[in-house]
Amino acid sequence: MATGVRVAEGQGNLPKLVLTSPQKSEAEIYLFGGCITSWKVASGKDLLFVRPDAVFNKIKPISGGVPHCFPQFGPGLIQQHGFGRNMDWSVVDSENADDSAAVTLELKDGPYSRAMWDFAFQALYKVTVGADSLSTELKITNTDNKPFSFTTALHTYFRASSAKASVRGLKGCKTLNKDPDPKNPIEGKEDRDEVTFPGFLDCVYLDAPNELQFDNGLGDKIIIKNTNWSDAVLWNPHTQMEACYRDFVCVENAKLGDVKLEPGQSWTATQLLSIC
């Protein structure tokens, strides 16, 4: 492992990676699910949120941080949000620079994934922690001899005051509001400069811009930049999760239209979270 990357024992005795930048920012990633569960800036403040009902037993995915939704976002032909968050990823590379530490994880098909989605694939996920940033690069490659299609998302849970949090940059986007009926979302258009979380919220923003501004309501402003994540999703369960809904909101980068890959083809998307 490179300097700035170490393996540690996480909750439930599950292995996790701890990335530390030279400026002492830190990220933690569980190999189970390839899930980033913590992003602390140099002050020690954690900007991500793991739900208090999260379990670390490899039976259920980790509820919080930055879970993967792959090869399906939401409900559909296979289990909710796919299997990427339910499988063990492996470390294939690590590196460090003057201002960052990085690790690359890999997920490949196996009996568990094949049972529900019968395709060969490789997912590479590079996570880099910088002085005041956390970046990810997800690369999906079709290693099969037949084409496949998928949808995907990074279901990011941000620590927040849900009553005070807001997102800017979505004005003008086409929306699919899953409240009150998630199976029949209501089409609309966002006309607000600043989207807030006053109650239950589950809304898709199609063709979202590649930069959003997120205010967590706790004194932090985070710029969310991306390439190739064409859509955004805002979610807060409100009183459906009475124990914790006040303490987080989800601002998710997503690719909700089918990505079709021929054999040998790849699709890559990046996300950059930075404090401003």
Image: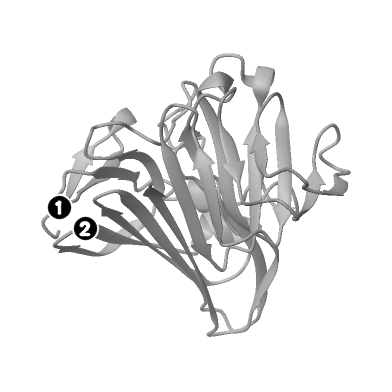
In the shown orientation, is residue 212 left or right of residue 270?
right
- As drawn, the label of residue 4 is 1
Disc 1 on helix, strand or loop? Answer: loop
In the shown orientation, is residue 273 left or right of residue 177?
left
Compared to residue 260, the image places residue 54 above or below, namely: above
Spot occupied by residue 161 in the image (x, y as percentages of width and height): 51, 24
Spot occupied by residue 102 in the image (x, y as percentages of width and height): 25, 59
Residue at image coords 13%, 60%: 2
110 and 243: which one is in front?
243
Q: Is residue 253 visible?
A: yes
Whether label 1 touches label 2, CB < 8 Å: yes
- As drawn, the label of residue 100 is 2
Residue 209 location, quadrant: bottom right
Disc 2 on helix, strand or loop? Answer: strand
Q: Residues within 10 Å of mark 1 (few under 14, many from 20)?
A: many
Q: Residues within 10 Å of mark 2 (few under 14, many from 20)?
A: many
Residue at image coords 66%, 80%: 147
Residue 47 location, quadrant: top left
What amino acid does circle 2 point to?
Answer: Ser
33 and 237: which one is in front?
237
Residue 245 location, quadrant: top right
What amino acid does circle 1 point to?
Answer: Gly
